[in-house]
Image (cartoon, rainbow, N blue to C red):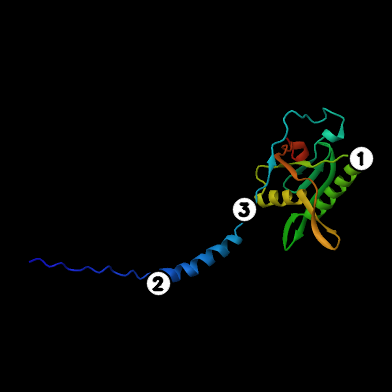
Amino acid sequence: MRTRRIREDADLDITSFMNLMIILVPVLLMSMVFSHITVLDLQLPDLAAEPGASTDLKNESLELVISDDVMVINFPAGVEVKRIGKIETDGELDYDYSLLSDALQQVKRLLRNRDIDKKDITILSQPDTDYQTIVRAMDTVRSYKAVVAVSVVDAELFPAISLGDAPQKSAAVAGEKP
C-alpha cells in the first residue's frame, strides 16, 4: 500500500526585503532631485560671413577674444571695443567677469539705441585656455543679474553663443623679436 505524503509549501519570509525597499525607494527618489544636467546650446560661426563684407551693423559679429592675459570685446569683428585684464581675487589672478558683464551690458544698450536686437556672440579662445574660464565667460555673456520689481532675475545679454579659435598673436604683437 502506498502512502502519499502531503507536502506543505514553504512560506517565504520577505519582511527584510520589504524593509529594504521601504528605505531604499525614498532615498533614491530624493537623490534624483540633486542630479541636474545643464545643456548649453552652441552654434558654429558662420563661414559665409566675412569680416568687413557688409556695412550693416545688424549683420556684423560681436566677438569676445580670450587670450592668456586679457579679454577683448570686438564689434564689429576685429574692431576693439573694450579690453578687460586680470584682477587678483582670493590670492589668484583671474579675469574681471563683472567688468566684462558691465561692458557687454553697455554694448547691448548701444545696440538697442540703434534699434539692433543682437543675440549672438562668438567666443574665440586659445587652444590652451582653461575650461573653467570658457564656461564662466559663456555664463557671463549669456545673462546678467538685474532687479525687476524687487526680485532678482536673469536679464538676457547674448544667449546665442558660438565658439571658435582665437587668432594667433604674431611675433611683433607679442613683443618678441623675430
Q: Nearer the viewer, residue 59 or 83?
A: 59
Q: Quadrant of residue 17?
A: bottom left
Per the image, the residue denoted by label 1 is 114
**Which marked residue is nearer to the observer: mark 3 or mark 2?**
2
Asked whether disc 3 touches disc 2, contact meaning CB atoms under 8 Å apart, the reply is no
User: Quick check: marks 3 and 1 in contact, CB under 8 Å?
Assistant: no
* Residue 62 location (% of width, % of height): 80, 40
Q: Quadrant of residue 171?
A: top right
Q: Quadrant of the C terminus?
A: top right
Q: Is residue 96 visible?
A: no
Disc 2 element: helix
CA gap between label 3 and label 1 equals 38 Å
Instruction: Please name the residue shown 69% across and 48% down the image.
Output: 134
Mark 2 Cα shell of 10 Å, populated few (<14), some (14-19), many (≥20): few
Residue drawn at the location 40% of the way across and 71% of the way down: 16
Q: Residue at x 71, y 52 (%)?
A: 136
Distance from Cα at disc 3 to Cα at disc 2: 37 Å
Relative horizontal placement of residue 71, taking residue 44 as reference (left or right): right
Q: Which mark is residue 37?
A: 3
Q: Which residue is mark 2?
A: 15
Please report the residue visible at 82 percent of the width from the left and 62 percent of the height from the top: 151
Q: Position of residue 2 (x, y in %)?
A: 10, 66
Position of residue 67 measured from the top left corner of the image (x, y, whole percent): 73, 45
Alpha-carbon neighbours of circle 1 within 10 Å: few (<14), some, or many (≥20)?
A: few
Specify the amino acid type for callout 3.
Ile
**Amino acid at dot 1:** Arg
Q: Earlier in the sequence, mark 3 or mark 2?
A: 2
Callout 3: SS: loop
Q: Earlier in the sequence, mark 1 or mark 2?
A: 2
